[in-house]
Every structure is written in C-alpha cells, then in structure tokens.
C-alpha cells in the first residue's frame, strides 16, 4: 500500500484534511469541547490501548473492514457511511439494500489516499493490522488530521499482534468483545439503544442455536484459506467461540496462534470428525471458495481418506463468521445445525 505522504498529492490531501477537520471540529482541546453536552458529545472511549474522542456523531465514516461495516449497517447507519473497503464475502443477509447505497472503494485494503478522498470524520477497522504500518495507515496518521479511529476490541483483548502473521491469543476470545464493539460503535454514532437491541438479538440467537446441544464427542477443524499451506484455526479466536459454545473440540486447540499454517499430513493424523470450511469470494489466496477447498480435499492423497472427507461432513461458513464479528453467531448456528445433521450432537 502507498504511504500516506508518498507524493505531492498525498501531502495536499493531508493539508486539506487538516483545514477541513479543524473548521468542522472547532477547538478540540478547549474545555468547552471536552465537557459533555446535552447531546452526549464528546464521546470518549478506551480502545486497544488508545483514548479515542469523538466530538460529534460521524457523518462520513469509512469502515475499512467488512466486519466493522456490517455492524454499522446492522445499526441502521448506512446513511452515515461515506465508503467501505476490504471484503471477503457477500454482505450479510438482510443488509443488501443498505449496503448497495454505500460506495466500496476497494475489495482489499485501500490506500490511505483512497480513504482520505472520502473526507472521513471517523475510520473503523476489525483488525489492528488494518490501521497499522503495512495496512491502510497507522492510526496516529489519521488522528494527526483530527480523524478518530477505532479497532475492534476482539482483535486486541488478550491478543499479541506484535509479530508477523495473524497474532497469538493469550486468552480465549468471547462474544463479549464483539458485543462491546457493537455498544462502542452505537455510542459513537449516538444510537446506544440500537446497540443494546442488536446485542440482545445476537445473544438470543446463540441461546437458540445451542439450546440442549451436546457435542462433547465431536472434533472439528476450521480451514480459512490456502491449499498449499492451509490457514487453520488455533484454539482461541472466533472458531474457539463456536467450538466452546457447542461443547465440541478443535483438533488444533493446542496452538494459540490465530491462524497457524499447518501441513496436511498433520491434519490427516488428527482426523477431525467435521471440517468447517471457509467459503470466501475474495481472490487473494488459493482455494478461497468452498468448491475449490472440497475438490482439493477429495483429490489430495493426504486428505482424501480422512473420515470427514469420506463421509462429506462439511460445514460451510463465510469468512466473516470465522473472524470475530457479529457473524460469528452465524457460525454457531451453522456448525450446530451441521453437527445435528451428522448425528454428532444430542
């Protein structure tokens, strides 16, 4: 991705952004700006080790990951979004009409220039790496312009993202981090009651999906992408949430890496009962779609004789359901339904 200040056009954008945001935001450090007004602003949040202050409800927000976008759409905020970016899947069912009115500036991570072209007043992301060096741009570069940024707490709570790869979990993720993100974003946009309703709806869906289920004898493996060196789920990310909610076992729960790359011989040795397969529409890795993944599994000598492959015990999930997001609830529902269909859950 090009750096934020990579050439003269970028420098001009930054200067224009500072002028615009200063004019709109007023004196950000004045006592008047810092005292909470009758409308509830400014809003201040502690987010992934940073203090984020939003002086007014965003009107031109740019969520730069699909998970963040879908939360905002679910909160009825499509008219407050200037653009979105970085998609792995079709939009969540029920949000198609709202999403159709929001420009998509990039299927993958956009350049910082593309984001700044939207004149954003708030930028949100699902992953720390999105708003970091090597991603769209580091958070501080947006904040220097007066643009508040927000990253999902699910990607920074009990997680070390300091090394290469997708990070290492130091503790098990729970849906509480996702619910916290919903509430935070609802507060930022001045619609806290919508956030509470969405959280209540998600909780109710989890209760319904897991009611009376006993999958304690079932073993699972989650495959996100790549056929040569597959990204498989470790113990404690979103797949861990799904697995624990159902009482099942992830055959790679002995690694805390979010998505370690593991060879197929090791997969065959662990021989899971069910393969949970990411059905992605992006094109940045090999074997993105479920069709390609299943074709590989059924033809590869190392995998074709695995129990799950021989019995076609596949559960297909969107990429968003396999990452910490509101669609992880969709993952709980689909894996629960699959286990019941396969006779592996009471």
Image: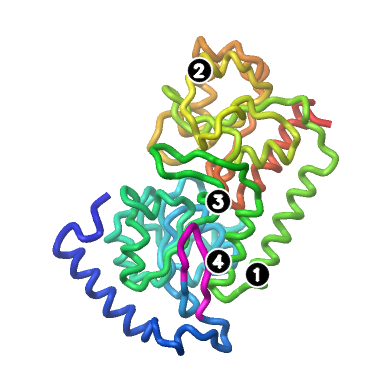
The relative height of residue 159 versus residue 4 in the rendered view (above or below) is: above
Residue identified by numbered label 3: 157
Dot 1 crowding, Cα within 10 Å, few <14, some 14–19, many 20+: some
- Mark 3 touching mark 4, by CB under 8 A? no
- Mark 1 touching mark 3, by CB under 8 A? no
Residue identified by numbered label 4: 185
- Mark 2 touching mark 1, by CB under 8 A? no
Left or right of 199? Residue 70 is left
Q: In front of the other: label 3 or label 4?
A: 3
Residue identified by numbered label 2: 264
Q: Earlier in the sequence, mark 2 or mark 1?
A: 1
**Considering the image in quadrants, where does the C terminus appear?**
top right
Real-space CA distance between mark 1 and mark 4, rounded to the nearest whole angstrom: 10 Å
Numbered mark located on residue 8 in the image: none
Real-space CA distance between mark 2 and mark 4, rounded to the nearest whole angstrom: 40 Å
Residue identified by numbered label 1: 194
Res. 38 image quadrant: bottom right
Residue lying at 68% horizontally and 36% vertically, measured from the top left: 243
Q: Earlier in the sequence, mark 1 or mark 4?
A: 4
Q: Secondary structure at mark 3?
A: loop
Residue lying at 78% horizontally and 49% vertically, measured from the top left: 207
Dot 3 crowding, Cα within 10 Å, few <14, some 14–19, many 20+: some
User: In the rendered structure, which segment of residues is drawn in magenta?
Assistant: 42-52
Q: Secondary structure at mark 2?
A: helix
Residue 280: % across, % down: 49, 39
Residue 236: % across, % down: 60, 38
Real-space CA distance between mark 2 and mark 1, rounded to the nearest whole angstrom: 44 Å
Q: Earlier in the sequence, mark 2 or mark 4?
A: 4
Q: Main secondary structure of the magenta part?
A: strand
Real-space CA distance between mark 2 and mark 3, rounded to the nearest whole angstrom: 31 Å
Res. 185 image quadrant: bottom right
Left or right of 284? Residue 231 is right
């Amino acid at each position: 991705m090009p750096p934020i200040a990579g050439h003269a056009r970028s420098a001009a954008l930054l200067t224009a952004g500072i002028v615009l945001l200063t004019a709109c935001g007023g004196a950000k450090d004045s006592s008047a700006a810092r005292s909470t007004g009758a409308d509830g602003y400014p809003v201040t949040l502690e987010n992934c080790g940073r203090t984020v202050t939003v002086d007014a409800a965003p009107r031109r927000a740019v969520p730069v990951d699909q998970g963040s976008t879908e939360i905002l759409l679910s909160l009825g905020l499509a008219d407050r979004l200037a653009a979105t970016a970085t998609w792995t899947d079709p939009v969540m069912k029920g949000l198609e009409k709202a999403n159709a009115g929001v420009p998509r500036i990039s299927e993958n991570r956009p350049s910082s220039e593309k984001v700044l072209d939207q004149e954003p007043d708030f930028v949100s992301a699902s992953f720390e790496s999105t708003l970091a060096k090597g991603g769209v741009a580091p958070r501080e570069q947006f904040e220097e312009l007066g643009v508040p940024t927000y990253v999902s707490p699910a990607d920074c709570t009990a997680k070390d993202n300091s090394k290469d790869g997708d990070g290492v979990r130091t503790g098990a993720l729970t849906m509480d981090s996702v619910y916290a993100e919903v509430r935070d974003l609802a507060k930022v946009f001045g619609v806290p009651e919508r956030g509470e309703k969405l959280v209540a709806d998600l909780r109710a869906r989890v209760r319904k999906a897991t009611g009376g289920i006993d999958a304690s004898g079932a073993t699972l493996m989650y495959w996100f992408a790549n056929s040569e060196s597959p990204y498989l789920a470790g113990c404690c990310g979103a797949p861990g949430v799904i697995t624990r909610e159902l009482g099942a076992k992830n055959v790679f729960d002995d690694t805390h890496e979010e998505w370690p790359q593991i060879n197929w011989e090791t997969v065959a040795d662990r021989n899971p009962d069910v393969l949970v397969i990411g059905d992605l529409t992006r094109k940045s890795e090999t074997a993105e779609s479920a069709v390609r993944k299943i074709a590989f599994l059924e033809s590869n000598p190392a995998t074709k004789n695995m129990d799950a492959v021989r019995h076609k015990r596949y559960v297909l999930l969107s990429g968003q359901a396999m990452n910490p997001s509101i669609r992880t609830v969709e993952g709980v529902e689909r894996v629960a339904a699959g286990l019941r269909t396969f006779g592996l859950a009471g």
